[in-house]
Image: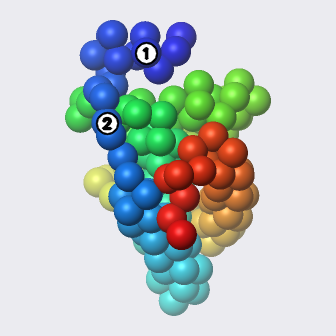
Amino acid sequence: MSLKQWAENGWLRPHKTSAQEIGNLLAIVERDLKDASIRDLSPDARFTTAYNAALKLCTICLYAEGYRAERNMAHYRTIEALPLILGADRSGDVDYLNTCRSKRNTSEYDYIDVVSDDDADELIGFVGELKDKVMTWLKSRHGKLVPS
């Protein structure tokens, strides 16, 4: 499927972004990566914060392509769109992020101590790598959206 087909299905809607909006989202990513690295926070809090950074990177991709997810299942759709945007080889990233989404939901709404420090550290590392991939893609495909 394509993003256009997703929009036709009602899963996405058109969205016009700007370098300022992308810059704001990138600032959130930077803040969240910094905050997630604070060892005094619980692993659950670090993980949730790192997950938010990953979600913002996926959002940047979707916005740059001219779409945003509809409210229903917004996190899921935003993550699932990643291989449609960055390429099919990103499917493993989707699987990993969906596992993280589930853990994050459990730690936010149901239980404490759902994740370990190792889980949080792994996600922080993943987000750093994803950020590099997204920035490379953004510069090559949507250079005008890269904040100066």
| In the image: residue 133, left or right of residue 120 | right
User: Which residue lies at the image location 71% right of the left edge and 24% below the top edge?
Assistant: 88
Position of the C terminus, as image quadrant, is bottom right
Q: Is residue 102 above or below residue 107?
A: above
Q: In which quarter of the image is residue 74?
A: top left
Where residue 130 appears, x then y in whole percent?
A: 67, 53
Q: Which of 8 and 126 is in front in this view?
A: 8
Circles 2 and 1: CB atoms closer than 8 Å: no
Is residue 88 in view from this perspective?
A: yes
Res 111 label? none
Q: In which quarter of the image is residue 12?
A: top left
Q: Considering only order in the chain, which callout, 1 or 2, is on the residue closer to the N terminus?
A: 1
Where residue 100 appears, x then y in whole percent?
A: 53, 48
User: Which residue lies at the image location 63% right of the left edge and 40% below the top edge?
Assistant: 141
| In the image: residue 93, left or right of residue 15 | right
Indicate the amino acid at tag 2.
Answer: His
User: Which residue lies at the image location 33% right of the left edge and 10% below the top edge?
Assistant: 8
Where residue 122 appears, x then y in whole percent?
A: 69, 61
Where residue 31 appears, x then y in whole percent?
A: 47, 76
Q: Mark 1 points at which residue?
A: 4
Determine the CA span between mark 2 and mark 1: 12 Å
Secondary structure at numbered mark 2? loop
Res 15 label? 2
Count residues near mark 2 (Cα–Cα under 10 Å), then give few for <14, some for 14-19, many for 20+: some
Q: Which of 16 and 76 is in front in this view?
A: 16
User: Which residue lies at the image location 38% right of the left edge and 52% below the top edge?
Assistant: 18
Secondary structure at numbered mark 1? helix
Indicate the amino acid at tag 1.
Answer: Lys
